[in-house]
Amino acid sequence: MKSTRRQAIRNQASILTLLAGASGLNAFASPADGGKGSSFGFDEEQMKNVLVNIDLEEGTVCGFIANMDGKPYVLTNTQLISGHHRFTLSTLSGTMLRPTRIELSATRDLARIQVESDAGLKLAAAVSDDTEVMLAGFTSSQSSYSETGGIVQNANEERFDITADFGKENCGSPILTAKMEVCGIASNIDYYTNSGISWGPATRNFIYRIEGDSWFSPNWKQYDTLFGKPLRDADSFRQQVYGLASNWMKNLKSRIETEEDVPLEVERWIKQHNGMVGNLEDKRGSKKKGTDPNKSFQKDFSDSCNALVDMCEAKARSLTFVAEQKNATPFTSNQFLWRSRELLLFVRVVRAFEESKSNMIW
């Protein structure tokens, strides 16, 4: 049990390092309450001309127009458009934008889409701690604009925090200085963490800097097929498996029920567990003398744990394989690696949970 816990700590430390990226930002820390900044009172109509809705097959995400290298681009987070070959762009004021080229950051969760537009935010010089900034607040479901003031904290060459509150729905929104210049983009990471044998979701909100980055222009459809869709599928797998397994840990004697479409390997594990529950019910209902339902069920429970572990380890191997592809950028590779190590950390949690039930009377 101790070695399992030590390995889990090492795995979580490696995930922290990967989440932090090259900047070394503490991925698990939250910004201190350093006070709120002021609203800058920018012209709402002017802001609606640069704030952009990106319409996907499954909804809408945020972006904004900024002038970079003498050209107008719509900036957003790469993770927001990953897994989507096609999308449409329109400003909050209703102007449709035609994308002509997609470029991705090699080291950050940033995508820029070249468009034709007369509007666009200027890039600010690098901001430092204690600078007052403002999140240009709008969500993909709204056409209204709002300002949320904040103060820069924990600034480094790649990221910084702000004291303004924002959520996942604001990702892709610009962070502006008092001169109405953009200094960053609202971003987040959704990950899972453990405490003993418990397992649950966590979110880290932060700001990516835009300046000082390198860009490349892939064939978007090919790149998205190789990396975007597999990453989105991995996140769907994580969400489904972790959710089902958390309920499984709380209700070992109950059948797993889900109305979601799940991958074949998840469906097999569910059937294996439900077969275990059926066996327990049959043995408890048996009137035969000399039967030992507890011993038999313990084996079925161990088989269920093995099936869950095998499934997660196989997924982790597949993610590591994608991360090692030669045409993966450092950022893309990192995204697959930390998810792989997170799955291996979850495997340790399952094994610790299995050990905790070794003497249970069923």
Image: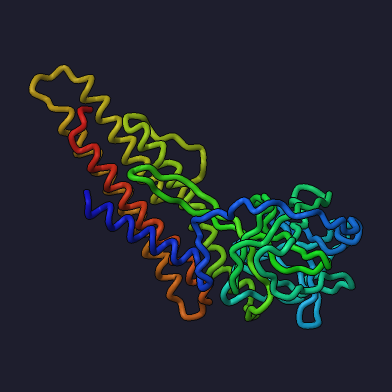
Taking the view exactly as shown, the residue that stands out farthest to the left is 290
State the image coordinates of residue 329 (x, y, percent, origin top left): 53, 77
Q: Is residue 98 above or below residue 260?
A: below
In the image, 303 versus 39, the foreground residue is 39
Q: Would residue 19 appear left or right of 178 to someone viewing this image?
A: left
What colour scheme was applied to this rendering of the protein?
A: rainbow
**How far across and down, in percent of the image, does residue 19 sit?**
49, 63
Residue at point 33%, 43% (across, down): 197
Most extreme residue toward the top is: 287
Above or below 136: residue 275:
above
Give the residue drawn at x 53%, y 71%.
23
Q: Is residue 247 visible?
A: yes
| Residue 58 seen anywhere in this rendered image of the structure | no
Task: Look at the picture and state if 41 lies above or below 253.
Answer: below
Q: Quadrant of residue 81?
A: bottom right
Image point 44% across, 66% down: which residue? 17
Which one is in front, 125 or 344?
125
